[in-house]
Amino acid sequence: MFPIRDHNPSNRTPFVTWALIAINIVVFLSYYPTLSGSERLLMAFFDDWALVPREVVSGSDGHTLVTSMFLHGGWMHLIGNMLFLWIFGDNMEDQFGHLRFLGFYLAAGIAAAVGQILAAPASLVPMVGASGAIAGVMGAYLLFFPRARIDVLVIIVVLIKIFTIPAWIMLGLWFALQLFNGMAMDVAGGGVAYWAHAGGFVAGVVLALPVWLRRGGISFWQKWHGEPPHAAADYVIAPRGPLSLPRVQRVRSSPRAAAPIANVGATRIPRSNARKRLFSPWNTTPKG
């Protein structure tokens, strides 16, 4: 189950999200194509800039708490992380504001690194990747938009299908998987830093709480039913062609917006409020 997009357009241009994606790509291209041919050179580079728990615990290499979140171990590692940041980052930047979102992202990444250090303080295995910081973004997204719709790609042997599910199911399953794998694997060995993911996710929820409370807290959920606050918007799936994924478009009906977009052959997605509500912890009844 792999998310490919959400049905939650942002109201402001996500300059910081775009910049973070660009920085990660530029940094990756600056070292990986050159060093990937030599494992010795690549590991020497990671020794200087990746996070090594034992080194940080000993009081050295504190800078790697930040630098490690801009490094990646391969193309798929980079592409997967940037896709998640692209899907969830713009909405949280919309809620936080540009500079506050940048501070939130870095703080979540540092918290994720601390989580991994606490799980294996004596480990000498370098840790790299933006996934801890992005897990923080996902945790904040769950707090704000638990019933936003997420399109996920499911591949079972030869069956490839896209399903649309609420964010609380997708993100909840993802978080549960990090906890399960974190407890099942040898933390001191190599592999995926599951405790960094879990720590970043929890940190994201905690760091987002003040902003969520300023939005009204529980009343924010009650007002929007845990969905994106786009009361004047519907969504359509506009087909692109037999070999490309359909495009989600937002159709505004607000008096201040332009006329709705006409899409020949497009299929309208029913408004979530008009459908029978799925059970979830955020399925509250509006007051009044």
Image: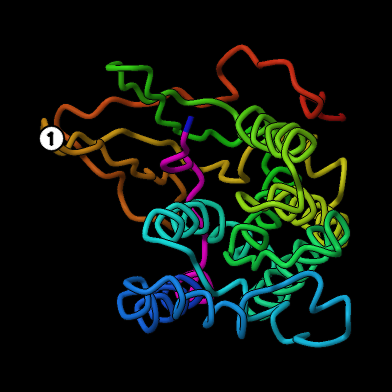
Would residue 134 be counted in the magenta stretch?
A: no
Q: Residues within 10 Å of mark 1 (few under 14, many from 20)?
A: few
Would residue 15 be counted in the magenta stretch?
A: yes
Where is residue 171 shown, x and y percent of the image? 65, 37
**213 left or right of 199 in image:** right
Q: Which residue is mark 1?
A: 243
Relative to 130, residue 241 above or below: above
Does the image show residue 225? no
Q: Closer to the camera, 158 or 146? A: 158
Residue 284 sits in which quadrant? top right
Residue with the most extreme front position: 40
**204 left or right of 206 in image:** left
Question: Number of numbered discs present?
Answer: 1
Where is residue 54 shown, x and y percent of the image? 81, 72
SS at mark 1 in the image: loop
Where is residue 92 shown, x and y percent of the image? 63, 59
Question: What stretch of residues is rendered in magenta?
Answer: 2-18
Relative to 22, residue 6 above or below: above
Q: Closer to the camera, 219 or 161? A: 161
Q: Residue at x 51, y 35 (%)?
A: 150
Residue with the most extreme top position: 276
Q: Closer to the camera, 212 or 73? A: 73
Q: Residue at x 37, y 60 (%)?
A: 75
Where is residue 166 shown, x and y percent of the image? 59, 28
Q: What amino acid is labelled 1 in the image?
A: Leu
Residue 179 sits in which quadrant? top right
Residue 147 sits in which quadrant? top right
Does the image show residue 270? yes
Residue with the most extreme left position: 242
Q: Residue at x 21, y 40 (%)?
A: 262
Quadrant in the picture for the C terminus: top right
Q: Residue at x 87, y 30 (%)?
A: 287
